[in-house]
Image (cartoon, grey):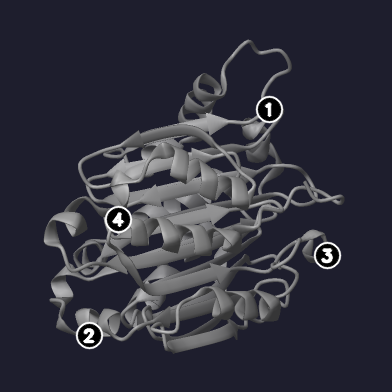
Amino acid sequence: MAVSGFEGFEKRLELQFSGDDPVVNEIGLRQLHFESIEQVLTQVQCTVVSAVGNRYFDSYVLSESSLFVYPTKIIIKTCGTTQLLKSVCPLILFAREIGLRVSACRYTRGNFIFPNSQPFPHTSFKEEVIYLEEQLPPNLCFRKASVMPSKLSSHSWHVFTATDGSHMLMQQLRDESDEFYTIEVCMTELDRVLARKFFRRPNDGKTGDSAGKEMTEITGICDINPNALICDFAFDPCGYSMNGIDGNRYSTIHVTPEDGYSYASFECIFSVYDDTNDVVMEALKKVVQVFRPGVVSISTTGTSTDEMWTRMSTAFEPLGMKCRSCSIDEFPAAGTVVFGTFTTRRK
């Protein structure tokens, strides 16, 4: 924990892998022993507190956020003072042992609330980029790092991507109707009354799992995607994490509810088809209603999403949120990244 308070803003790492053996690709990273996963998390300085899986991927709730393991993709999202990027080298080595090589990397994060409390290599974005450049193999030669700004100096978006080129070719050949996007939402200045729902009562006699299920129900998080299988956990004395599984898609929420540095995040993947049917807009509206934040920053990663931003502004209008800024950039291995901020109208 940081000296000033708990750092809610997460660091997010996504690694894509490929292999020559179709059988290996079908099972891939999911055949890693749990002991290997624990070794990686030890480097990061966090542990597994709950887990669930289906036919598509495995989902782990961590002591600091989440881990998702697909056959050829792994996503780790950690908060606090974890050293996320120290997972890169062991993950590449473990994957190599089962016949997979890394083909793309994406690292994203917002602005830390307590940047001076972050350990190496997270002391600055420049330091993070240098560290990634050293850890990734030379075949990932298409690389880009950028800080996407907003009108709010406390909310900018840091992005680093790298690919070997084959990943970009696969994106170009993929049918657009199957295109998936990633959406990352960061919320600060949570409504104090709603944030209190993420505190546990002293000596409540509940486990982290049972207390988590209660929070999922009383806060309305269960209604964001009623079709999802939810794996949730409540920390003592406060804090909450959940992973949702819906077919081959995940969603995740993490909450740091303390006054003065309250924070909540929501992340999910969606498709072009979802967007045309307002599924994403409805989910985002529900998320905002659960937390009623003062500031919301949203990043979407995929193909061009200009129209979605117009619709998002319209959807947030009745909730008292106004779009303050929006920026767009292109990244290898990621496509178009759109980053914007919303604030309550009183700001």
Give me the C-alpha separation between circle 2 and circle 1. 47 Å
Where on the picture, by quarter, is residue 226? top left
Identify the residue at image location x=68%, y=81%: 126
Q: Which mark is residue 169?
A: 2
Gap in angstroms between the C-alphas marked 1 and 3: 25 Å
Amino acid at circle 4: Ile
Amino acid type of the residue tagged 2 in the rendering: Leu
Q: Which residue is mark 1?
A: 236
Residue 211, given in percent of the width and then of the height, sits at 55, 22
Mark in the foreground, 1 or 3: 3
Give the CA separation, mark 2 to mark 3.
40 Å
Q: Residues within 10 Å of mark 4 (few under 14, many from 20)?
A: some
Q: Single out the mark in the foreground, 4 or 2.
A: 4
Q: Secondary structure at mark 4?
A: loop
Residue 226 visible in the picture: yes
- Residue 305: mark in rendering: none
Mark in the foreground, 3 or 4: 4
- How far apart marks 3 and 4 lie (CA) works out to 39 Å
Whole-percent x, y for residue 91 in the image: 45, 58
Q: Callout 2: few (<14), some (14-19), or many (20+) C-alpha neighbours within 10 Å?
A: few
* Residue at figure coordinates x 77%, y 46% from the top left: 1
Q: Which residue is mark 3?
A: 116
Task: Give yes or no for contact between labels 2 and 1 (Cβ–Cβ under 8 Å).
Answer: no
Classify 81 as above or below 116.
above
* Residue bearing mark 4: 98
Residue closer to the observer: 20 or 347: 20
Locate the C terminus and report the quarter of the image it occupies: bottom right
Q: Quadrant of residue 315?
A: bottom left
Q: Secondary structure at mark 1?
A: loop
Asked whether disc 4 touches disc 1, contact meaning CB atoms under 8 Å apart, the reply is no
